[in-house]
Amino acid sequence: MKETSFIEQNKKKWERFEKLYASKSEDPEELSDLYMDITNDLGYAQTFYKRRTVRVYLNQLAQKVFSGVHKQKGESLKKLINVWQVSLPLEIYRSRKNLLFAFIAFLVYATLGALTTLVNPDFPRIVLGDGYVEMTLENIAKGNPLAVYDSEDQTAMFIMITTNNLKVSFLTFFVGFFFTIGTHLLLFSNGVMLGSFQYYFYLKGLLLTSFLGIWIHGAFEISSIVLSGGAGITVGSGLLFPGSYTRLQALQLSAKRGLKIMLSLVPFIIAAGFLESFVTHNYDVLPDWSKWLLIAFSFLMILFVYVIYPIIVARKYPHLIDNEELLERKEKKEWIMYKLRNSGEILFDTFQFYRLNFHKFMRPIITYALPLALILVAIQDYSRIEDLEIEHWFDWMGQLTVMFGIDFVSVRDPIIAFSWTIVFSLIFLSVFWTFISSGKELTKSDFLIFARKNIVKVWLANLLLFVIVFCLPWYILLPALLIIPIVSLLGPIVVFYEKGSLKEKLSKGFGFGIGSYGNTLISLIAVLLFVCLLLQPFALVFSIHNEYTNKPEIRDLLDMLVETARRFFELYSDHAVVYGNIIRQIFYVTFVFLLIPYFAVIIGVCYFSELEKKEARSLKEAFNKFGRTNRYKESEEDFE
């Protein structure tokens, strides 16, 4: 059928729909009938008129019909109830092994804390702190062992406790993304503290008193921590054991499942804060039977919601247990080197390149750059041991300053800083080598030849960048970010650009940097903001120690880890602070070796984008292929 005949035959029907839609008709049946007719017309048009405007027009009509039909339904309360009745219990059932594992692990850790207290009655001072133990002893002497829960402002206490419990629970979940290691550390820390705390009261003959007081709110609070650990292990398990999925797909599924479990815990965490503030506060005036009843009810509710009911739902809907949500399988796109990119495309392509080629550029980095970096850190720690024996006011800045030697307090520091510039040059070379060897296997000998040929050029090209980062004080470093895009493309151009001497390439590199200034600056700022956000749970950017207590105002995961480790080191060494700072340095070195390659990829992508803008290399390649058939381009048949 000719296109004109097709339009003439159906235009009245289409006009009828447009009038119906414009009048906002409440007749879903007529809309549904039109939906069937128009989608049939659309299918016909896609087959015979795929390059014609009529196909676009019908596609728009079909979308309107679809939204017209479905807007009548809306989101109902029934659907929300169904989530709690079926969807959430099934997710809990699918995660039952991880939840059980977290529960058993927590029991083991609590038992370990109790047994250690049995062997060493002073162990609670290590895990809880001398101040807390002394306060507890004073309260016991006064005849009120749980006076710590007394507070005149119960509302403020409720807000503070609930906020803290939410932070601890979500942190326990969130750190599961990193191969479950952080989740196990937090379960271990909380379990050991609970076991030692309860056994300490047993040694004082107050086990029953403490149990009836603490577990009024502890039933919900401790259960929430354990279940948060199970949700965190669920997330990490998707990354560790992807099964038939890709790791990214498995992580998406497990993260969604873990997050649903976490959201279901929020009411219990709030209830725990309420009970601790308004009920445990008055534990000494409540009869024992009411305490037993409240504790039993709390545990039974947790048991029902997270054990019994999921089993009931799973038996009722056995066909839904293995009905995993199917993820759209994205076709792997070929990396296009010469391509005009805006800032959004630069960020996307940078992430894609970093993810797909991580194992390639990390091999030479781990082989050559990392050992040199560890040697430099060891030299600094040995020669500046006094800096390891203190807790720095601004920890991550203080630690990096010592490791890089950029405060120049001794003759050795400039040599160390210079050596770090070689480390960073090796990292840049590893990434640049990955760019030019795309699709090829990396070999050590090929990389060494490439490094010997280019390391001096890359070091000279990045010298100004190194001076900005290493030599400027921190309060000038942030404004200096405005200069970095101008000099950042010098490194790629001395390696990738084929023509001209080193001097000519450097001169051209400044031009490239100015031309790509906006895209590079926006990309760098976006990445820095994302990195700061990502780092918050681990090493807060503003984790500044209080000048009076020498403790951070807001404890992050790294603070918790170091504090727990220090308490154990204090048992066997007089240098616990030194070991704690070494743990921090391990974290910071790991972070640096993940971030610097990402920065190198960004400037590589920006360089190729700017090169395409100036020299149109992809267009020249297209001209060379002109005349060859391409199934994605129009042919004469489309115009018949």
Image: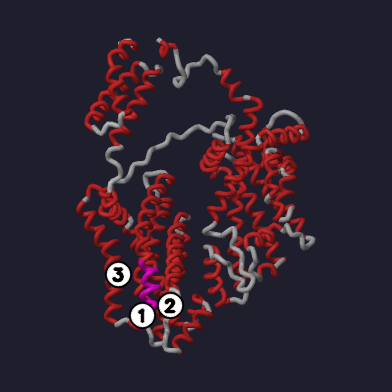
Amino acid beneath label 2: Tyr
Label 2: which residue?
149
Amino acid beneath label 3: Phe
Pointers 2 and 1 in contact (CB under 8 A)? yes
User: Position of 87 compared to 600: left or right?
Assistant: left
> Mark 2 or mark 1, which has the lower sequence index?
2
How far apart are the alpha carbons under marks 3 and 1? 18 Å
Residue 88 vertical position relative to residue 158 in the rendered view, above or below = above
Residue displayed at 45% across by 17% down: 634
* Local crowd size for mark 2, using a 10 Å CA cut-off: few (<14), some (14–19), many (≥20): some
Point out the residue furthest to the front here.
Answer: 23
Residue 272 seen = yes
| Label 1 element class | helix
- Where does the magenta region start and end? 271-284
How far apart are the alpha carbons under marks 2 and 1? 9 Å
Which of the labelled discs sits on residue 299, or is there none? Answer: 3
Q: State yes or no: residue 368 in magenta.
A: no
| Label 3 element class | helix
